[in-house]
Image: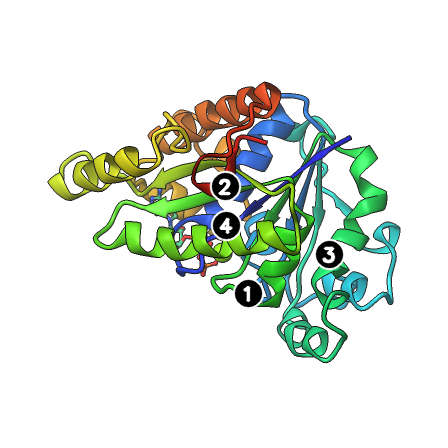
């Protein structure tokens, strides 16, 4: 049965999509069957893989509203690097309306639309990675309800820890209600800049508060990582020898190792490692 991991942080531009897309690429390249789910109406994960977000085809929106099945929506990303192991459940701009439409549905039902949509797919994949929008609205709640664990990308910047506390509070609330088995797989430090004291300070602070959650591998600030999506390519395809590529390759291995360890820790009321 596949593990469902969502990439969540209510703060915008911290590297959720970059991390989800590139981990999906490396996991697939390693022979793991991966489904990347674009749960954001910005559809950045969709376009990062070279799929037109304005194309007139069914998307996650149609699955959430019950108008399409997985077979109608899931696309194979059939490129040599991914060894036929990477699929995409694309987003579209329609998804912006889904938040409003979901809100009109009864509480207790509207939070589980994504979980229901993914249920029949779990057996087909080793990893289902869900890229969340920058909010704690219904689309993110749907992802947290469906997920086995959260991966939290955190930008190495001032006040990063305050945003993280808000997110862990939300995760604790979800744990007491919508999804009692949710855990944190790990915190990924992104856009690390070794030339600044600030990056090192932020990492130290996060290590002090979340020593078990923080991944050993950090993602450096790298222009190559920011260029790759404009070509519709993952960093593995665009520049596999760049520092950003090496970081995501190593992080993918760490994600696999943590997934397999399946250790459980109830410290702080939030379980770590799925
Ligand atoms: P949103 O909240 O809008 O969904 P996000 O959290 O998904 O944003 P990304 O889209 O992954 O964040 O990244 C924001 C911007 O920063 C993008 O332009 C991306 O290319 C760039 N970026 C991400 N990671 C890095 C990095 N390690 N080095 C340099 N640029 C990066
Ligand atoms: Mg994003």
Q: Secondary structure at mark 4?
A: helix
Residue matched to label 2: 270
Front residue (pair 107, 44): 107
Say whether disc 4 or disc 2 marks the residue closer to the N-terminus: 4
Coloured how? rainbow
Q: Secondary structure at mark 3?
A: helix
Asked whether residue 193 appears in the rendered view, the answer is no
Residue drawn at 36 percent across, 25 percent down: 216
Residue matched to label 3: 114
Q: Depth-wise, is mark 1 or mark 3 nearer the camera?
A: 3
What label sits on residue 17 in the rendered view? Answer: 4
Say whether disc 3 or disc 4 marks the residue closer to the N-terminus: 4
Say whether disc 2 or disc 1 marks the residue closer to the N-terminus: 1
> In the displayed structure, does residue 220 sit left or right of residue 173?
left
> In the displayed structure, does residue 159 sit left or right of residue 243?
left
Asked whether residue 132 appears in the rendered view, the answer is yes
The Cα atoms of the two marked residues, 4 and 2, are separated by 24 Å
Q: Depth-wise, is mark 2 or mark 3 nearer the camera?
A: 2
Point out the image quarter for the N terminus.
top right
Q: How far across and how far down the image is residue 138, in percent?
A: 61, 67
């Amino acid at each position: 049965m596949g593990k469902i991991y969502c990439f969540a942080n209510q703060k915008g531009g911290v590297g959720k999509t970059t991390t989800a897309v590139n981990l999906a690429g490396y996991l697939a390249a390693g022979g793991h069957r991966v489904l990347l789910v674009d749960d954001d109406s910005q559809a950045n994960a969709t376009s990062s893989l070279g799929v037109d977000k304005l194309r007139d085809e069914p998307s996650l929106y149609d699955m959430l509203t019950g108008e399409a099945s997985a077979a109608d929506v899931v696309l194979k990303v059939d490129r040599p690097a991914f060894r036929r192991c990477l699929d995409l459940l694309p987003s579209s701009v329609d998804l912006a309306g889904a938040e409003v439409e979901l809100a009109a549905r009864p509480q207790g039902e509207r939070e589980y639309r994504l979980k229901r949509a993914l249920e029949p797919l779990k057996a087909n994949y080793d990893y289902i990675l869900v890229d969340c929008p920058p909010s704690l609205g219904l689309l993110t709640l749907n992802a947290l309800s469906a997920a086995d664990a959260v991966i939290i990308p955190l930008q190495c910047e001032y006040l990063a820890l305050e945003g993280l506390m808000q997110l862990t509070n939300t995760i604790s609330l979800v744990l007491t209600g919508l999804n009692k088995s949710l855990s944190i797989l790990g915190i990924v430090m992104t856009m690390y800049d070794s030339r600044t004291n600030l990056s090192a300070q932020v990492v130290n602070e996060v290590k002090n508060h979340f020593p078990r959650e923080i991944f050993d591998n950090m993602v450096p600030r790298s222009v190559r990582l920011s260029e790759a999506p404009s070509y519709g390519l993952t960093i593995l395809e665009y520049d596999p020898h760049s520092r950003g590529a090496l970081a995501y390759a190593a992080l993918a291995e760490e994600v696999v190792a943590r997934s397999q360890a399946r250790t459980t820790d109830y410290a702080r009321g939030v379980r770590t490692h799925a």
